[in-house]
Image: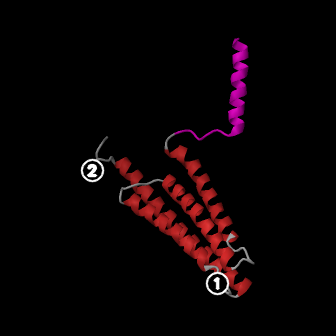
Amino acid sequence: MATSSNSTPFSDEELKHIAKAKILHRLAFRIHLAAFIGVNLALAAINYLTSAFSPAWFVYPVAGWFIGLVAHGTIYALYVGGTAGGAKIGLVMDAAIYLAAVPALAFINFFSSPGYMWFLWPTVFWLVGIVIQGLAYRATAAKAAGKPPKKSWLERGVDKEMDKIKSKRQG
């Protein structure tokens, strides 16, 4: 491994890659912060418009989203500190928090205001966010590892059929 002019164990190209990753992690945190603010303002508005804050159910999803925001901040801090990194950790943490928070939100909902299933709002939109994050991770993980992207089911089926045809011709 070549070293940079500052006597680090990383080459200039590797340092550039690390710097780019830090910038992207910081951007991801800022995007999640903006989503946190926007979605929770929207939930507060929905709460006000549908029930004039009686009950004030929007505080519960705010708490759940705050956990997610803290997780993203932690991922960024760990990556910057060199302890851990990668989009996969973020995806796994988000999924784990989602799986822990949704039953808690449902429990709170059914005991605080069983007539209105407000927990579905954060449940659905949070799941959409995780699915988008998972798809983005899947699309970029192979590229980042220098591997060709995974073939679609159709491309794999065509390859399989081509192999069958080739084996019949040779046999």
Determine which quarter of the picture holds residue 104: bottom right
Q: Mark 2 points at which residue?
A: 8
Count residues near mark 1 (Cα–Cα under 10 Å), then give few for <14, some for 14-19, many for 20+. some
**Residue 125 can be seen in this image:** yes
Vertical position of residue 171 compared to residue 75: above or below:
above
Q: In which quarter of the image is residue 84?
A: bottom left
Label 2 or label 1, whichever lies nearer to me, is: 1
Amino acid on which the number 2 mark rests in the picture: Thr
Instruction: Report the magenta residues as a range.
Output: 147-171
**In the rendered structure, does residue 36 fall within the stretch colored magenta?**
no
Which residue is at a point 53% across and 47% down the rendered structure image? 141
In the image as oriented, which residue stretches furthest toward the front? 111
What amino acid is at disc 1?
A: Ala
Q: Which colour scheme is used?
A: secondary structure
Q: Can residue 37 be seen in the rendering of this structure?
A: no
Which residue occupies the foreground of this view, 128 or 27? 128
State the image quarter where residue 108 is shown: bottom right
Q: Find the distance from the CA under tag 2 to the CA under tag 1.
A: 54 Å
Q: Quadrant of the N terminus?
A: top left
* Residue at (61, 59) in percent of width and height: 130
**Image quarter (top left, top right, bottom left or bottom right) of the C terminus:** top right
Q: Which residue is drawn at 68% across and 34% down?
A: 156
Q: Nearer the viewer, residue 87 or 105?
A: 105
Measured from the top left, where is residue 139 in percent x and y? 59, 48
Q: Is residue 90 left or right of residue 158?
A: left
Q: Do the residues labelled 2 and 1 touch (CB within 8 Å)?
A: no
Q: Which numbered disc covers residue 95?
A: none
Q: From what the image shows, is residue 163 above or below residue 66? A: above
